[in-house]
């Protein structure tokens, strides 16, 4: 059994523990049924993550530069908070022999993760770390399976605020044993148990450091059915790419599972690609608008210093971010008209009223008709239409509003 005592002093955060350390990959933190923290993670995470920008080529300077950019570019003012370090931060040669603790690669991070965390915190931002519910991470660095309690305590001491928890290199004895039964509860699958052990470990340090928990199991094991009981968000698929086909395919996928999205629980459509690849401006607008509309985390994934002013304006759009970060209504926009893949017409509520998002998935500009009687939740026939992108009122319309939507663009309206 593992006994954990946590002590907090006014100036420093110290987590001390008496535990039988385990070097095996068996359960280190028996799932207690404790859920994720309710102190953090109410709305989808807004921030930055190192992976799409740098993959494994990360270091102290790049993480600090990203944090600096979040402040200097005004992204912090817009609500971007998390500076998340992805794979390849730790010492690939393994854990500390004496303490069994995971160690930072001191060539990449000379002042450790604690040094970076202190700096990020000094800017008023929060810091995220990455690990894996297997023996090693996808890039071959130490994993946390069987070391959950030790690692949660280590991260809490360093000042970590967010964990992305990946799914590579799972030992054979942890394979799922789904028997095909219709009533099979994936919450009790080995996949979920691996993630629940970390929930328990994070709960044991939550009074010292509440840590937001992003499950990254790529949509395996029906994660949408148990994700909300285990973490704050869950990836739905393999990795993103800076392509229109990725954007449309993940939107399609998300439309099947939107009923699982709500306050403190969201489908993670993966990190943003704005600034990467050859997405057109319209495609970048759709990327951002739909991640906001469907309430995915929005974690920027590029070298922020290279974003141009148009891209920054997209990412800082006040009304779309407000929809994403609504602290009263957690429900995402949902398709109200089908017939295309992905659907083009979505509606959702915020404290301000009903919002409509219309994508044009066609390869030419097209006229789109928002027929008020078709929009879920809308009761007006003579309705005020407001453009969320520009912040301008468009006027009052009867029965419907017709607009030309450019190829691969998305319009966003508030209708009252
Ligand atoms: C993948 C994950 C990516 C990234 C990568 C790091 O499994 O989906 O987002 O974290 O591992 O190796």
Image (cartoon, rainbow, N blue to C red):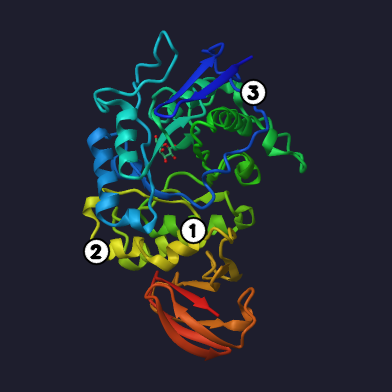
Residue 72 lies, in percent from the top left, at: 24, 53
> Which mark is on residue 309?
2
Q: Earlier in the sequence, mark 2 or mark 1?
A: 2
Residue 305 lies, in percent from the top left, at: 22, 51
Q: Does residue 290 appear anywhere in the picture? A: no
> Which mark is on residue 30?
3
Q: Mark 1 — residue?
A: 325
In the rendered structure, are the residues bearing label 2 and label 1 in contact, judged by CB atoms less than 8 Å apart?
no
- Comparing marks 1 and 3, which lies closer to the viewer? 1
Residue 58 lies, in percent from the top left, at: 28, 35
User: Would you say 295 lies left or right of 84 here?
Assistant: right
Q: Is residue 250 above or below residue 20?
A: below
Mark 2 neighbour class, 10 Å CA radius: few under 14, some 14 to 19, many 20 or more: few
User: Would you say 311 lies left or right of 82 here?
Assistant: left
Q: Is residue 27 above or below residue 297?
A: above
- Which quarter of the rendering shows the N terminus? top right
């Amino acid at each position: 059994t593992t006994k954990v005592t946590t002590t907090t002093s006014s100036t420093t955060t110290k987590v001390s523990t008496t535990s039988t350390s385990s070097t095996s990959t068996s359960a280190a933190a028996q799932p207690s049924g404790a859920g994720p923290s309710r102190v953090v993670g109410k709305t989808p995470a807004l921030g930055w993550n190192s992976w799409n920008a740098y993959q494994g080529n990360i270091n102290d300077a790049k993480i600090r530069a990203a944090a600096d950019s979040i402040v200097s570019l005004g992204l912090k003012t817009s609500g971007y908070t998390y500076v998340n370090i992805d794979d390849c931060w730790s010492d690939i040669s393994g854990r500390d022999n004496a303490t069994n603790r995971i160690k930072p690669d001191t060539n990449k991070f000379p002042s450790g993760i604690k040094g970076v965390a202190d700096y990020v915190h000094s800017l008023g931002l929060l810091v995220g770390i990455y690990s894996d519910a297997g023996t090693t991470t996808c890039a071959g660095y130490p994993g946390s399976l069987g070391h959950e309690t030790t690692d949660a305590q280590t991260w809490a001491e360093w000042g970590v605020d967010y964990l992305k928890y990946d799914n590579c290199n799972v030992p054979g004895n942890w394979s799922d044993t789904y028997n095909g039964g219709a009533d099979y509860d994936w919450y009790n699958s080995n996949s979920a148990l691996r993630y629940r052990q970390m929930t328990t470990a994070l709960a044991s340090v939550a009074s010292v450091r509440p840590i937001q928990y992003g499950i990254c199991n790529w949509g395996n094991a029906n994660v949408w059915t148990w994700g909300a009981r285990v973490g704050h968000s869950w990836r739905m698929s393999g990795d993103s790419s800076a392509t229109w086909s990725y954007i449309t395919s993940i939107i399609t996928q998300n439309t099947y599972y939107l009923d699982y999205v709500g306050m403190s629980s969201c489908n993670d459509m993966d990190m943003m690609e704005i600034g990467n690849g050859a997405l057109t401006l319209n495609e970048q607008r759709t990327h951002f608008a739909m991640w906001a509309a469907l309430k995915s985390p929005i974690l920027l994934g590029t070298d922020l210093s290279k974003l141009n002013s148009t891209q920054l304006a997209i990412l800082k759009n006040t009304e779309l971010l407000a929809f994403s970060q609504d602290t009263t209504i957690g429900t995402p926009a949902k398709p109200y008209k089908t017939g295309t893949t992905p659907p083009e017409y979505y509606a959702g509520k915020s404290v301000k009223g009903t919002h409509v998002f219309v994508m044009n998935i066609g390869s030419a500009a097209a006229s789109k008709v928002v027929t008020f009687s078709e929009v879920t939740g809308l009761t007006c026939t003579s309705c005020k239409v407001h453009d969320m992108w520009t912040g301008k009122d468009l006027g009052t319309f009867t029965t419907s509003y017709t607009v030309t939507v450019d190829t691969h663009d998305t319009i966003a309206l508030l209708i009252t």
